[in-house]
Image (tube, coloured by chain):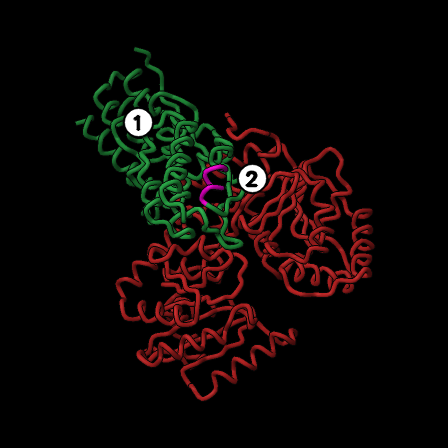
Chain colours: A green, B red
Amino acid sequence: MKEEPFRFYSRLNLSELTGIRAATLLQLAKCIKQAPDSCIYHHTHRYLQIHQHICPEPPNDFAYWVSTIMKEEELAEKLTSIDVIRFPSISELRKTVAQVITDYVSGNPKAKFKFAKQNQEFHFIKSVSFIFFAKQEAYDLKSFLGALQKVTISSIYFHMFESKIRLGKESNDFSFWLAESLGEDELAHRISSLDPYAFTMEGLRFKLIALVKNSLK
Amino acid sequence: MNKLQDYSDIVGAYTIDELKILAEMLQRRPIQTINSTAVGGGVAEILNRMVPLLKEMGVNIRWDVIKGGMDFFDVTEKFHNALHGERVEVTGRDYEVFLETSKRNIEEMEISGDIVFIHDPQPVALIKRRSGNKWIWRCHIDVSLPHEGVWNFVKGFVKDYDASVFSAPDFSHPLTIRQFLIAPSIDPLSDKNKDIPQETIDQTLIKYNLNTDKPIITQISRFDRLKDPLGVIEAYKLVKKYIDCQLVLAGGTAIDDPEGMKVYEEVQNRASGDSDIHVIIMPHNDIEVNALQRASNVIVQKSLKEGFGLTVTEALWKEKPVVASAVGGIPLQVKHKFSGLLCYSVEGAAFNIKQLLNNKEYASQLGKNGKEHVKNNYLLTRHLKDYMLVFLSLYYNKDIINLD
């Protein structure tokens, strides 16, 4: 067992416009297939950051646009319920999102002829992520708990979501360190079994804190 | 002047720490920010707040203002309106005046930053002084449907910048340079937004003869047709049939704006005969605007066209239930039935206002959600973070940047 401290990193995102726009469902599917990974990531994860306490809308921008602008509720529901956690990479997620849309249009040909009004097109935006050391380290479960209570949600977000789906790691960073450095296999398993997409960001922080506190008992 | 630490109670200490980490990374990069005026207008207001905070964090930033005479600023005002999509006649002489003054600024202005951050079209031609440093053009205007000639003229300069910044996706255009998306912000500690004592609110209500026994519906905006004040009166009249309420239409001075004065007179005419409609010209009295917003039961922004709609942000920050048109940047702020109610017509606005006045708990929940949404996304600290990230982005050409 390697007893290395856990270094908390944080990441901050900047939104960059790509100039890619879609006005129909088929254009949306086509653009999803072609847009950079950072766009797919942005539109499937942005809501987590924007609504840190309550999640009021379909949890990805594609579903939100399909619902509010294109008024295709059935498709919106299908897009909303895509289980993002099971995708190991953005490219796999991208394929599924595009396929759900093209399948729906095949079965509902009239949907093909709907156009978004001017200024209501879907704009593809990408997240430029800046990762940096958050000046917090943990050496054991107690200091890990302390840091979890202190760091920004950007830091929790980075270790739970971004490092996995965007940087291609097998698990979230917390579970990896807890198992590899502290031998806390059960706690690591409990954290990796969570569906973090089903929590608000503050809700996820509270859940992690509760799990760690439980292990400290 | 507020210090960075003053924001800590609002956004949390660690958010402030993150800003300091970003600032540390910029310490060796002198930054020069340039706009057209040191006072008056939204850009100067935000720079007056941001520059001292950046300096406090150790960022080497200086703020300069271009020079120009009345003729130049008349032309840039015309350009501003044209870029906003208004029908204005722009002549060849207008372009000449712009270029003549720009030439003098290009020759005389000291350019000293590693990063030069230019705001809006007035100083855009300074890019001619580019020499190995990085240049950003920040567009604060809604250029979604601009006057083509003026936009192409401005674009001729913008193409030589390293990056541009727009406030909403619809405002952007095909450009060969990078385009970042940064929403504007409000300062929670400014006179317009800070907490104020109930006594100040009460005094304002007395001053403007408002009755505390009747619900108050308010729209804060200048007297401009695009803000649809007459539509707000129509919506109020539909509500008034069922609920005894008051309407406040309060906005900036119209004295030096003939068109604004005309709209103000039309609004007064439409309001005449109803003592519960209060039409108030309120020039630059931020505390009173703050008090009126806080005293309101519902805040309306029934614009026909809107930039980002910071009056909506201000209302949400005060936990007020909002009824607002789904135009410009408003849908980014108001998620229907979550952080307010969106409307598309006079009748829709009236229906929504009635809903909120009749359902206080629902209205209160929308207000609470709205405040949280603003806290997370539209405060000055987020704006500072985004600007620092844009500055850093100039030195990387990747989507995932490790700053460690």
**Horizontal and vertical percent position of residue A149:** 31, 35
Q: Give the range drawn in magenta.
A: A25-31
Check disc 2 and give the amino acid type.
Answer: Thr
Residue A47 tag number = none
Front residue (pair B113, A194):
A194
User: Can you say whether A161 is above or below B197 in the image?
Assistant: above
User: Can you say whether B358 is above or below B50 in the image?
Assistant: below
User: Can you say whether A103 is above or below B53 in the image?
Assistant: above
Residue behind mark 1: A144
Callout 2 crowding tier (Cα within 10 Å): few <14, some 14–19, many ≥20: many
The local secondary structure at tag 2 comes to: strand
Front residue (pair B378, B154):
B154
**Horizontal and vertical percent position of residue B314:** 45, 60
Callout 1 crowding tier (Cα within 10 Å): few <14, some 14–19, many ≥20: many
**Horizontal and vertical percent position of residue B184:** 52, 52
Q: Are marks 2 and 1 in contact (CB under 8 Å)?
A: no
Residue B210 visible from this viewpoint: yes
Residue behind mark 2: A18
Q: Residue at x 38, y 54 (%)?
A: B335
Magenta-colored stretch includes residue B127: no
Q: Which mark is in front, 2 or 1?
A: 2
Name the residue furthest left.
A217
Q: Is the magenta stretch mostly helix, strand or loop?
A: helix
**Horizontal and vertical percent position of residue A95:** 41, 30
Q: Residue at x 37, y 68 (%)?
A: B298
Q: Seen in the image, is B328 located left or right of residue B147?
A: left
Check disc 1 and give the amino acid type.
Answer: Phe
Give the chain letter at badge 2: A
Give the chain letter at badge 1: A
